[in-house]
Image (cartoon, helix red, strand yellow):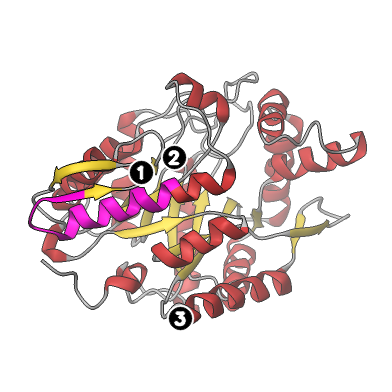
């Protein structure tokens, strides 16, 4: 079996009529991506998850992207402490939807590639080719300790990840048994049947931020997930001001480096949306959720795990904490939020993973007001 000619540009097959792909990000975790203590935050239940996925599918949302999380960040809410495992989550949602692409997020040190390949092909057949893989080569040390797995040195993580993805792709494409003699994997008579649905490899995404991580993504993946740097805060609103020119240069650089490898790659980013009928309402809710009712204990735990607390001055730590609190917010009226999307698209981003304080209660307004505006601009078409 060989893969189709679209192998390198799978991200474009997600509702190809949409120039800017939009997805829901992180709703397999309690509190989603907002470390807040407000009572109306995303609490996570299967009925709500399924209802949201079906609603997003009907609205024309392009993808659903989960976070691979095994342990919460503590704090008052134990931020992201209640989670659904992503491969079974994806397979279940693929069975209940028709068009949306559903990712599974996999930590390569925790999943053997032979088992993972079979799990993902199963999900891909359930969704008739709509499964996608978000591959993670390393993460939080305290999560890995739950499994008795030691975090490798940074470069070794991607060396291991390269063997892992090489095994995975061979299992997906080779009909006969094969041996694999690598540094990390030594397999005898490995085989994986069936192959992916319709002989088309699932889309693969990675968010490696380092030089080594970016090189890994460019070599192996269809989509590269990256953040937007923030340069300052607006004194009047307290909202972050994104460095769009820097983002544009970064995206152009990713495409240029991919081109040197003879590949095409989509560049995706993330944003937290608070959309209300007036700008004042949106900003007020934003400050209430992420400042007045912030889960500071959870934020401090994230900073600790990233080694930031021990590396920066007290003044810089306060600034870093603000960054974690505020994320990358798109705050305002439907017109304002739609304009933000247009700016990100003009910077070259192909897709955006969106989060909300409460996905289920906030998405309908976003669907009715913001998606309609993006359709009028030509960035998207009606479902």
In 3D space, how far apart are the residues under numbered discs 2 and 3 (Cα atoms)?
Answer: 28 Å
Image side of residue 166 versus residue 43, left or right:
left
Determine the main secondary structure of the stretch shown in magenta.
helix
Q: Is residue 360 magenta?
A: no
Q: Are marks 1 and 3 in contact (CB under 8 Å)?
A: no
Q: Which of 293 and 67 is in front in this view?
A: 67
The earlier-in-sequence mark between 1 and 2 is: 2
In 3D space, how far apart are the residues under numbered discs 1 and 3 (Cα atoms)?
Answer: 25 Å
Residue at 48% from the left image edge and 59% from the top image edge: 216
Q: Can residue 110 be seen in this view?
A: yes
Q: Nearer the viewer, residue 122 or 282?
A: 122
Q: What element carries label 2?
A: loop
Instruction: Give the extent of the magenta segment.
Output: 160-179
Q: What element carries label 3?
A: loop
Q: Where is residue 283 in the image (x, y as percent from the top left)?
A: 72, 49
| Rendered-image quadrant of the N terminus | bottom left
Q: Where is residue 142 in the image (x, y as percent from the top left)?
A: 56, 24
| Rendered-image quadrant of the C terminus | bottom left
The earlier-in-sequence mark between 2 and 3 is: 2
The earlier-in-sequence mark between 1 and 3 is: 1
Residue at 85% from the left image edge and 37% from the top image edge: 318
- The residue pinned by badge 2 equals 27
Q: Do the residues labelled 2 and 3 touch (CB within 8 Å)?
A: no
Residue 52 is labelled as 1
- The residue pinned by badge 3 equals 378
Quarter of the image for residue 34 reads top right
Say which of marks 1 and 2 sits in front: 2
Q: Is residue 164 magenta?
A: yes
Q: Position of residue 254 (x, y in %)?
A: 56, 72
Quarter of the image for residue 186 reads top left
Position above or below: 255 against 353: below
């Amino acid at each position: 079996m060989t893969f189709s000619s679209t192998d390198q540009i799978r991200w474009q097959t997600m509702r190809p009529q949409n120039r800017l792909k939009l997805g829901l990000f992180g709703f397999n975790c309690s509190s989603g991506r907002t470390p807040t203590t407000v009572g109306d935050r995303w609490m996570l239940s299967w009925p709500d998850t399924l209802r949201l996925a079906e609603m997003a599918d009907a609205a024309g949302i392009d993808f659903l992207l989960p976070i691979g999380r095994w342990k919460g960040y503590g704090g008052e809410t134990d931020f992201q402490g209640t989670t659904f495992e992503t491969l079974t989550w994806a397979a279940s949602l693929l069975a209940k939807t028709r068009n949306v692409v559903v990712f599974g997020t996999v930590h390569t040190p925790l999943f053997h590639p032979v088992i993972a390949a079979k799990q993902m092909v199963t999900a891909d057949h359930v969704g008739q080719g709509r499964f996608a893989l978000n591959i993670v080569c390393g993460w939080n040390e305290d999560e890995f300790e739950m499994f008795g797995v030691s975090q490798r040195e940074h470069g070794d993580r991607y060396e291991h990840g390269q063997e892992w993805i090489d095994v995975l792709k061979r299992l997906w494409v080779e009909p006969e048994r094969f041996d694999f003699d690598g540094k990390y994997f030594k397999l005898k008579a490995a085989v994986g049947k069936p192959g992916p649905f319709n002989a088309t490899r699932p889309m693969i995404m990675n968010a490696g931020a380092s030089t080594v991580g970016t090189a890994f993504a460019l070599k192996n993946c269809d989509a590269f997930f990256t953040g937007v740097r923030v340069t300052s805060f607006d004194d009047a609103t307290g909202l972050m001001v994104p460095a769009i020119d820097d983002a544009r240069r970064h995206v152009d650089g990713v495409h240029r480096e991919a081109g040197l490898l003879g590949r095409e790659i989509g560049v995706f980013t993330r944003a937290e949306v608070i959309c209300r009928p007036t700008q004042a309402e949106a900003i007020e809710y934003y400050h209430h959720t992420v400042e007045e009712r912030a889960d500071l204990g959870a934020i401090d735990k994230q900073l600790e795990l990233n080694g930031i607390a021990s590396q920066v001055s007290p003044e810089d730590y306060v600034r870093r904490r603000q960054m974690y609190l505020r994320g990358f917010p798109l705050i305002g009226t439907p017109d304002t939020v739609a304009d933000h999307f247009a700016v990100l698209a003009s910077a070259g981003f192909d897709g955006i993973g969106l989060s909300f304080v409460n996905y289920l209660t906030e998405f309908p307004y976003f669907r009715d007001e913001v998606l309609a505006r993006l359709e009028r601009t030509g960035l998207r078409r009606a479902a």
